[in-house]
Image: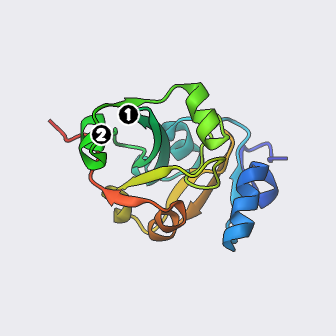
Amino acid sequence: MASPDNAPDRTTAHAHPRFAEALRALGLDVEVRRFPDATRTAAEAAAAIGCSLDQIVKSLVFAADGVPVLVLMDGASRVDPERVRAELGAAEVRRADAALVRETTGYAIGGVPPFGHRTRTRVLADRGLLRHDVVWAAAGTPHTVFALDPETLIGHAGATLADVREREA
């Protein structure tokens, strides 16, 4: 249990069982932090961890011509569906609904990790994630996160690097 000062618990036992199994299968020994308050949004996660918003990795599911694709994006940026469409050569890209997210990944929105999903899905990682030495991502629940260097995270996600963030006006 977390201490009264809102400090996180730190053990892999707090990860979602599917994600904990993925960590074991990949031979990754990472610390999973569980927070008493939800870290469902990037802003909530950054505040709880004490890191910058762009160090948070959002795992977002889109449907490209009806086929799920996972996009890894920093917490301070938004995905540009048009850039995803162009990257994939798709006719249409739209944000997936909660049912498709759960069906594809096995996790609820707000807790989707970058790997360890129910189904094998194409993954795009925005190149901007590489600006950091360490990034933080969900560990399968809205209360859990883990840290990893972005190259390792992107590699284990099987992601293709792409420029899919919205351009600043």
Disc 2 is placed on an element classified as loop
Residue under numbered circle 1: 65
Towards the viewer: 160 or 111: 160
| 45 displayed left or right of 54 | right
Q: Specify the quadrant of the image occupied by residue 91.
A: top left
In the image, is 112 to the left or to the right of 143? left
Asked if marks 1 and 2 touch (Cβ < 8 Å), the reply is yes
Ranked by sequence position, the earlier of labels 1 and 2 is: 1
Could you tell whether 92 is left or right of 167 in the image? right
In the rendered image, residue 116, in percent from the top left (x then y), is placed at: 64, 55
Residue bearing the label numbered 2: 90
* Residue lying farthest to the bottom in this orientation: 27
Disc 1 packing (10 Å; few <14; some 14–19; many ≥20): some
- What's the distance in space between the residues labelled 1 and 2, CA to CA? 6 Å
Note whether residue 11 is visible: no
User: From the viewer's perspective, is residue 132 above or below residue 51?
Assistant: below
x, y percent for residue 152: 51, 70
Q: Position of residue 39 (x, y in %)?
A: 61, 39
Q: Residue at x 63, y 35 (%)?
A: 103
